[in-house]
């Protein structure tokens, strides 16, 4: 599963509070969501925490967000570890500060042997960046660029493509998230702002997903022959 965690700023604005107040609540919502996903046996959760385009925000918001992400990777680490979550930080590391990079490496090292769920936190991530870096890696080794080789060179090659992509906050766009990996994902958009996305909202998204027919190019009749139980 993958989530574009959007709507923190509007959530704060509704309360006449600064945007960072919303982002802090967003971290709390992420903690709750991770726990709920672990309990529901979801094997991989990929969340969009900071896009390559989010650098365009006011400097104060960017530095506040980075501080919160360091806090997430440091203070929340014991709890994530205890839940059996393997943390992976996905995105272009070069653009990140030493503090963010160090806490990312630490979180990955501490949790590397956990198997209950993979949590990919996308920071300084862009779908176009991922496709380009995968192609550049293959080209540097003189390997052929094919859909399969690109898939294996992606920053997210350690998890399957998401079955479900959720975007909170009401916008109906991908915003340069998993461009390659979402080729066949089911998309679910909800008006709920990310800080309000609780277990009931997650279950509503999962129930909606359960009602979808995934055809992968086949006809509905073919799918029903392949999966008679569905
Ligand atoms: C999403 O919430 C979090 C990040 C992009 C880091 P926003 O900050 O985009 O919230 P809105 O869209 O302004 O409400
Ligand atoms: C997408 O949200 C990025 C994250 C949730 C981290 P944005 O709020 O940045 O997206 P746009 O710019 O409105 O499309
Ligand atoms: Mg937004």
Image: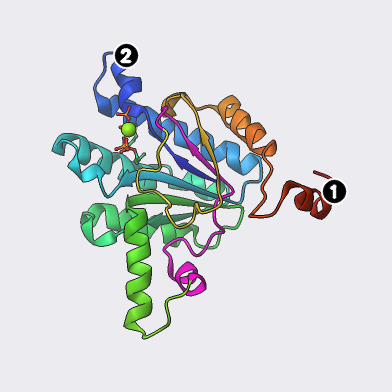
In the depicted structure, whether residue 15 falls above or below residue 89:
above
Residue at horizontal 28%, vertical 60%?
93
- Mark 1–mark 2 distance (CA, rounded to whole Å): 50 Å
Q: Is residue 14 above or below residue 176?
A: above
Rendered location of residue 67, percent (x, y):
26, 41
Say if 147 sits above or below 181 in the image.
below
SS under mark 2: loop
The residue closer to the viewer here, 53 or 96, is 53
Residue range corresponding to the magenta coloring = 147-171
Tell me the crowding category of disc 2: few under 14, some 14 to 19, or many 20 or more residues within 10 angstroms, Cα based: few
> Is 152 part of what is drawn in magenta?
yes
Q: Secondary structure at mark 1?
A: loop
- Label 1, residues with CA under 10 Å away: few <14, some 14-19, many ≥20: few
Given the current orientation, which residue lies at the most extreme left position? 59
Q: Residue at x 38, y 56 (%)?
A: 90
Is residue 214 shown left or right of residue 185?
A: right
Please give the residue where the numbered disc 1 appears in the rendered image.
228
Tell me the colour scheme of the image: rainbow
- Side of 212 relative to 1 (left or right): right
Q: Position of residue 230 (x, y in %)?
A: 79, 43
Q: In the rendering, which numbered label is found on residue 13?
A: none
Give the quadrant of residue 208.
Answer: top right
* Mark 1 / mark 2, whichever is N-terminal: 2
Name the mark on residue 15. 2
The quarter of the rendering in which ligand 3 is drawn is top left
């Amino acid at each position: 599963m993958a989530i574009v965690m959007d709507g923190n700023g509007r959530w704060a604005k509704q309360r006449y509070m600064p945007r960072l107040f919303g982002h802090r609540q967003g971290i709390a919502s992420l903690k709750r969501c991770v726990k709920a996903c672990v309990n529901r046996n979801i094997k991989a959760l990929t969340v969009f925490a900071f896009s390559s385009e989010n650098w365009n925000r006011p400097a104060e918001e960017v530095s506040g967000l980075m501080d919160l992400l360091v806090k997430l990777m440091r203070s929340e680490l014991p709890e994530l570890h205890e839940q059996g979550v393997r943390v992976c930080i996905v995105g272009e590391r070069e653009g990140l500060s030493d503090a963010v990079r160090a806490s990312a490496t630490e979180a990955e090292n501490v949790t590397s042997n956990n198997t209950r769920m993979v949590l990919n936190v996308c920071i300084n991530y862009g779908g176009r960046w991922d496709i380009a870096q995968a192609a550049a890696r293959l080209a540097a080794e003189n390997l052929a660029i094919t859909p399969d080789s690109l898939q294996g060179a992606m920053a997210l090659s350690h998890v399957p493509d998401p079955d479900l992509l959720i975007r909170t906050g009401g916008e109906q766009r991908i915003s340069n998230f998993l461009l390659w990996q979402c080729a066949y994902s089911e998309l679910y958009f909800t008006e709920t702002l990310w800080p309000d996305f609780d277990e009931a909202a997650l279950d509503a998204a999962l129930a909606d997903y359960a009602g979808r027919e995934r055809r992968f190019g086949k006809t509905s009749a073919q799918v029903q022959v392949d999966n008679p139980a569905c």
